[in-house]
Amino acid sequence: MLVAIDPPVNARRVVIPADNTHRAFAGRVTRWLKYSGGAVAASFVVYTIAYATGLVEGKRPQLDPDLAKLQAIHKGEYKPPNKTFKGGDQGWLDLKLHSVQTINHNTSIFRFKLPDENDVSGLQTASALLTKYKGPEMEKVVIRPYTPVSAEDQRGYIDFIIKKYPNGPMSEHFHSMDPPQRMDFKGPIPKYQWEQNKHDHICLIAGGTGITPMYQLCRAIFSNPNDKTKVTLVFGNVTEEDILLKRELEHLENTFPRRFKAFYMLDKPPKGWTQGTGYISRDLLKQVLPEPKVENVKLFVCGPPGMYKAISGMKKSPSEQGELSGLLKELGYTEEQVYKF
């Protein structure tokens, strides 16, 4: 027996077999939609179930990852992703460069393919990967940490935003690469272990490409409907063109206006710039950050060495936070309240 269902506007006609298997699957998808908080029209629910089960006539639209997983489970075809980076004594893995997308005059997004299209990186929030390179005329191997900007559950590839620094051997090597050259990676390198609602309010103070671990935190928080953490970002750059991930940050501001606030500082602002100018100052931090006495607040710092020295003091080593100094100490924050990436 077949039951004909009128599709939503602009959709192709849907035919759903009225058997118990598809009724059961329809129930699971409907419950999934309910629990995800979506208020979906009944006709759209039926249409979504139909194309999830592969019964829509014509070209199938791209499936939402969660819905695609449900479909694969239903068909008995679900394959849990393999984690590319497992840490421990795994050693170095070389990944193939897939593509390079230019962002501005000195910054690009580098996409590397994971070994299998079903693989995920294996990183958690917050963590990074090490890169390794030794040029033909270099005496020593260069190793640098980088935080990916692609989601931790992204399958098949991993993305990095890399800024080219003068006399920076690793960043210059990245920018000299062409697909399908390969790069050595190792990790994950754990940083700050995040859990939902771990803090009531976090404050992110970033400069340049120091935005990447901050964005990793933001993505984890705002992609989790159960995480209610408030986030304040203070982001310093030279020019407006240098503001990385600005579209993504603006999306967070528009989507979560009560929970996400961003303040931008530029050394060389364009005409008509309405936000801050110059370096990140004591007055700005005092104005936009919560008071040090506020309970369960955490501050994160990431940027060039000069910013660290001014804001929080340098890390003692890659694994040791070091003494708190700079503007945050002057404002009354404690070492327990500050984390340096």
Image (spheres, helix red, strand yellow):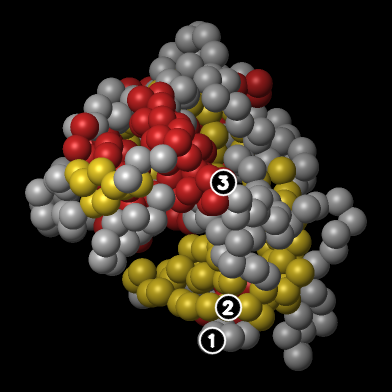
Q: Name the residue located 54 percent from the left edge and 51 percent from the top edge.
A: 75
Q: Which residue is mark 3?
A: 73
Q: Gap between marks 2 and 1, in whole Å?
A: 7 Å
Whether pointer 3 and pointer 1 mark residues with C-beta atoms closer than 8 Å, the reply is: no
Residue 146 position (above or below residue 280):
below
Q: Amino acid at mark 2?
A: Leu
Residue 135 left/right relative to 114: right
Instruction: Please indicate whether residue 263 sits to the left or right of residue 229 in the image.
Output: left
The kind of residue tagged 1 is Asp
Q: Residues within 10 Å of mark 3 (few under 14, many from 20)?
A: few
Does 266 sit above or below residue 42? below
Residue that badge 1 annotates: 178
Tell me the quarter of the picture where residue 104 sits. Answer: bottom left
Residue 176: give x, y in percent of width and height: 55, 85
- Circles 2 and 1 in contact, beta carbons < 8 Å: yes
Q: Which residue is mark 2?
A: 97
Q: Looking at the image, which residue sits at the far right?
A: 89
Where is residue 105? Give x, y as percent.
36, 75
Give the CA distance from mark 3 to mark 2. Answer: 32 Å
Within the image, what quadrant is residue 309 found in?
top right
Mark 1: secondary structure: loop
Looking at marks 3 and 2 on the same chain, the residue that comes earlier in the sequence is marked by: 3
Using a 10 Å C-alpha cutoff, classify the residue at mark 1 as few (fewer than 14 neighbours), some (14 to 19) or many (20 or more). some
Q: Residue at x 10, y 49 (%)?
A: 9
Residue projecting furthest to the bottom: 136
Q: Earlier in the sequence, mark 3 or mark 1?
A: 3
